[in-house]
Image: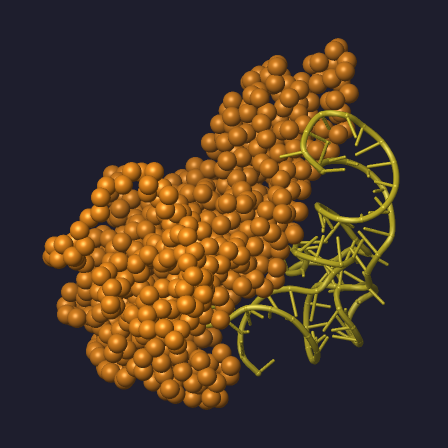
Chain colours: A orange, B yellow
Amino acid sequence: MTRKILVTAALPYANGHIHLGHLVEYIQTDIWVRFQKLRGHRCAFLCADDTHGTAIMMRARQEGRSEDALIADMRDAHLHDFTRFDVAFDNYGSTNSPENLALCGEIWSSLRQAGLVVEEDVTQLFDVEAGTFLADRFVKGTCPKCGSADQYGDNCDKCGATYSPSDLKNPVSTLSGSIPELRSAKHLFVRIETLHDFLNEWTQDGEHLQPEVANYLKGHFLQDPLRDWDVSRPAPYFGFPIPDSPGNYWYVWFDAPIGYMASLAEWCKRHGESFDDWWPRGADAETRGAEIHHFIGKDITYFHTLFWPAMLKAAGFKLPRQVHIHGFLTVDGEKMSKSKGTFVRASTYVKHLDPAFLRYFYASKLSAKLDDLDMNLDEFADKVNSDLVGKVVNLASRSARFVQPTGLSPVYPEDGGLFAQAAAEGEAIASAYDHLDYNTAMRLVMGLADRANKYIDEQAPWTLKKDPSQAGRLRDICTVTLNLFRQLAVYLAPVLPRLAEQAGELLHSPIRHWSDAQTPLAGTPVGEFQHMLKRVDKAQVLKMIEESREEAPGQATPASVPGVGAPGTATSPPTTDGPEALAAEPLSATCTFDDFAKVDMRVARVVAAEDLAESNKLLRLTLSLGGDDRRNVFAGIKGVYEPASLVGRLVILCANLAPRKMKFGVSEGMVLAAGPGGKDIFILAPDSGAVPGQRVH
RNA sequence: CGCGGGGUGGAGCAGUCUGGUAGCUCGCGAGGCUCAUAACCUCGAGGUCGCAGGUUCAAAUCCUGUCCCCGCCA
C-alpha cells in the first residue's frame, strides 16, 4: 500500500550557518525520506528558513542592511550547504513568506475564536539606546543568588539558579552596553492549559512520541497546570504584525512551526496539489491527508510536543503522526567547541571531505533514541575507509574490470544462495530504516558486504583469468559479485544516493526502487570502472579542524553584538536618497580594469582594537587575514567606533597598500570606509558568509 | 531519592524484552592472496559482561542493593 507522507525537518535559523550538528538532523531526515520514496511511497520533504526575531533584527542592524537582504543571503547559503550534502527538500520556504502570513492569520483567528488568547502585562528590561525590549539572553549581570558576575538574564551557570531578568543585579544590555530600564507592555498569551487533557492523551498514548520524551513531558510539564504561552512581542520586532493588535508582532516561535505548513502550501502550488489533501482541517481531518512526521532536536522538544499540537488541535488541523527527536552531536566525546575547532561548518567540511562520508558515518551511529551522537574523528576515518571503501566499493573495484569486455552472464549463475539470502534480508534492513535504526541497517549491510568479499576470495577470479578455458566461469563469478554489490548499493541508496547512481551507471541499470535488490541483473553490459569514493585522508580531517579553529573569533571577545549604537545603523530602507553626497565628492577619472586589479582588497577580521591615548583620531587595529596572517592597521575612526564594538567583526582591508610609518608604528593597510569624515564614517562590511582572506573582486 | 541514557576484551557496539556458560566491526599479532583505493581472506591473542548479594539445574540476560560515567534553557 502506498503511503502518503509529509516530512519536516526543523527550520534552521537565519542567523547562522549550517554546521555538522545541524546536519545530524537533516541527514537523518533525508535518509528517511529517500528510504520512503525508494519504497514507492509518496513523500513531501519540507523545510524553510526560520527568519524572524530579535536576533535577526539586531544582526541586520549590525550589518547595516535590511532584514530581507540578510535572510535572503542566509537562505542561499543554507540551501547551498544542503545541496552539497545531498539533503533534497521537495520545498524550501521561508517563514517570512505570504503563505506563512496567511496561515498565521488563520490559526490566530481560530485561537481567538476558541477564546484561547488572553492579554497580560509583562514587565521586561528595555534597552533605551537600542530601542528594544531585551530577551533574556541579551541581558547580563550579577546573579541575585550567588553573586557571580557576567550571567545571563534567565539563569546562572555558576550556581544553577533560575530567575527573571528583572531580578538580575547590575543588568547590562549586551546589545548596546547600556543599562536597561524596566518597562511594561501588553503581551498576548495562548492559554494552552485549556488543552491539558488533550495533551495528556496525545503525548502519553505511545503513538506519537518516543517513550523517553513522553515520560519527560509528563514529569516536567504535564503534572502541573500549563503556563500561558507568550506569543507576542512589542515593536520594534522583525516578524509579522498581529492584525488585531497594533504594535505587536507574533513571537518567532509562533510562526516558525506554521512555516512547515507554509512550505507545504508553496509546494502544493508548484505541483498542482491540494493543501487539504496533505494537511487537512476539520472534523474528519484525522482520517484524511498525509501522515505527518516532524524531525527535531531535543532542544526544541516542548515547542513541538506541547505548543504545536495544541495550536493544531485548537485550529482543527490534522495532528502529527509522530515527532522524532534526536540528540546532539559531540566531537571526540565533547560538545562542539569553536576554540577547539570542532564547531565545523558545513561549508568548511566540504572543502576537505566528501559529504558521503558524513552521511554514512552518521547513519552508522544513529538510532531512534535521543542519545547524543559522538563523532570520534579517528573512528570516522577508520569506519568510512574500512566499510565503504574496503568492503562495499571494493566489490565493484575487484570484479568490474574482468567483465567489462563481455558484460554480465546471460543467465544469473549459481551462487550458493548468496543473492537470495541478501534479498531476503532486505525486509529486515527496511524495517531498521523505517524505525530510524540506521545503525542496525548499516550493520546488516556490512555483514552482507563481508560475505560477498569472502565469496570472491574463495572463487579467486584472478586465477581463472589466467586460463582461457575458464572464461565463462570467470564471467559468472563477476556477475555474482557485481549483483551482490548492486544489492548493497540499493540498500545504501537512502544514505549514499551518489553511490547508487554510480552503481546504476556502471551496470547500465539505474536503481529506482527498493525491490531492485530482489532480482539479479543478467546479460547486461558493464561500464568502465571508475573510483566511486576516495579514502578519508586523516590529514584532511585535521585541516578541517584547523580551519574551523581559525574561523572562530577570539575567545576573549565579550558576547556582544558589535557595532550597535555606532553611527549609521538606521534600519529603515532608504527611500529618498539625495544628491548631496555625490556632489560633495565628485567621481574620479575613469580607471582601467588593470588599474582596479592592482588594488588588492581582502576580507579581514578585527581581532584586537586599541584606543591610542596620544592620538585624537586613530585606533590601532589588529586584523586577521586567516591563519597566522596578522596586520597592524591604524584607522582614523577614534570617537566614531568603540574599539570593543569592532572586535570580532569583518571589515574590508586594502591589503597591498604600501606600508606607512606613522607616529605610533607602521600601518600595514587600510580599512575601507565610506563617508565624508568627522563623525560620519561608515566601515564597510561583507555580507555574512565571507571569511577572512577572501579577495574582493 | 530531579529526569533520562549508559557501564560487555584497546576502541565502537550487538546480545538483556522471550535466562542455557559471549558475538560483531575496528585495532593488534601471525600467515595467505595479489583482482582491488596498503584494499581482501584465514588463524590467533585479548573479556570472571561496573560491583555485591539473591532467584534458578543454569544469569551478561530476572530480582534487590550499590558504585561510576554521560546528557538535560532536553
Q: Dividing the image into 4 quarters, which one contains the N terminus of chain A?
A: top left
Q: Nearer the viewer, residue A105 or A573?
A: A573
Residue A575 image-quadrant placement: bottom left
Which of the 4 image quadrants contains residue A140? bottom left
Q: State the residue lying farthest toward the top.
A: A469
For the question of whether residue A466 can be seen, the reply is: yes
A696 vs A422, left or right, is left
Tell me if residue A237 comes above or below residue A590 in the rendering.
below
Rendered position, B30 above or below A299: above
Q: Position of residue A304 (x, y in %)?
A: 38, 63
A163 and A135: which is toward the camera: A135
User: Residue A58 at what x, y percent from top left?
Assistant: 30, 66
The quadrant the C terminus of chain A occupies is: top left
Please name whichever residue, A5 or A683, is drawn nearer the observer in this view of the structure.
Answer: A683
In percent of width and height, residue A114 lies at 21, 68
Quadrant of residue A173 in the image? Answer: bottom left
Is A393 above or below relative to A551?
above
**Residue A235: x %, y % from top left:** 21, 70
User: In percent of the image, x 76 and y 18: which residue is there?
Assistant: A464
- Residue at image coords 73%, 33%: A454
Identify the residue at horizontal 54%, vertical 35% (top origin): A499
**Which residue is painted at 25% across and 78% down in the image?**
A128
Residue A391 lies left or right of residue A188; in this view the side is: right
